[in-house]
Amino acid sequence: MTPAVRIDALSAGYPSRTVLHDITTDIPAARMTAIVGANGSGKSTLLSVLAGVLTPSSGTVQRVGARRPALVVQHSAVPATLPITVRETVAMGRWAHRGPWRRLTRTDTEIVHDCMARLGITDLAGRRLTTLSGGQRQRALLAQALAQESDLLLLDEPTTGLDTQAQQQISQVLYEIRADGVTVVLATHDRNEALRADNCLLLRDGHLITAGDPITVLQDQISPTAVS
């Protein structure tokens, strides 16, 4: 499959320690890649490198697409005191095109509305983000990422801590945008979610243990209920 991202001999981390060690792999374009591994294995760090918010200490990351990657953090990472509405949250996805201080165009507004509708949160547009349930907040953050119109969507455990209905809603949207040609990369602890992906990377202590077909990668590597 054509790669959207090529990772070669990548090492990365923070001043106090190196988290990722000599990782080489391809992320296939217009497919879903699941990154699995125990807590502390380097999943979030790898997403940060792919998003461009963390610079590798060595090695290279080459992207085929020209658009800025869209990163969706966990809903619990949003400050509890952030005083913005759902509409304003989703509209922030247009900053990649307009900048943070320019007024939205009619096209921008239509995109924001369409993304809220796609995630089923139009009726929440005027609500403060902090008043929402975890599932509602996560859908708002995903809508924000979709409003960016990137060809590479990165998600850090998007369904963790959500009820079954919220998990299904988010998963359905991810499969739809993959079908639209967007490359989706998600870190996950959910075995079933990982098995539904097209490609899987198994990390352990910052090392890439294996990559490829999820059934093969996950066989005998994880428990029946969790990738941990």
Image (spheres, rainbow, N blue to C red):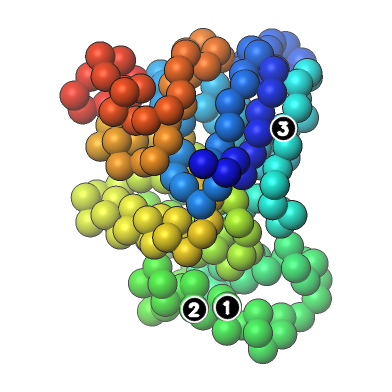
Disc on the earlier residue, 1 or 3: 3
Q: What residue is shown with label 1?
A: 111
Q: Is residue 143 above or below residue 170?
A: below
Left or right of residue 97, residue 3 in this image: left
Mark 3 and mark 2 in contact? Answer it, CB < 8 Å. Answer: no
Left or right of residue 164, residue 37 in this image: right
In the picture, the disc for residue 61 is: 3
The one of 3 and 13 positioned closer to us in this rendering = 3
Q: In what element is the residue under mark 1?
A: helix
Q: Residue at x 72, y 11 (%)?
A: 16
Q: Is residue 116 above or below residue 28?
A: below
Q: Could you tell me residue 76's position as x and y percent?
A: 46, 43
Q: In what element is the residue under mark 2?
A: helix
Type of amino acid under label 2: Asp
Q: Is residue 73 above or below residue 135?
A: above
For disc 3, the neighbor class at 10 Å (few under 14, some 14 to 19, many from 20) is: some
Type of amino acid under label 1: Ile
The one of 21 and 53 positioned closer to us in this rendering = 21
User: Is residue 132 something one can see in this rendering?
Assistant: no
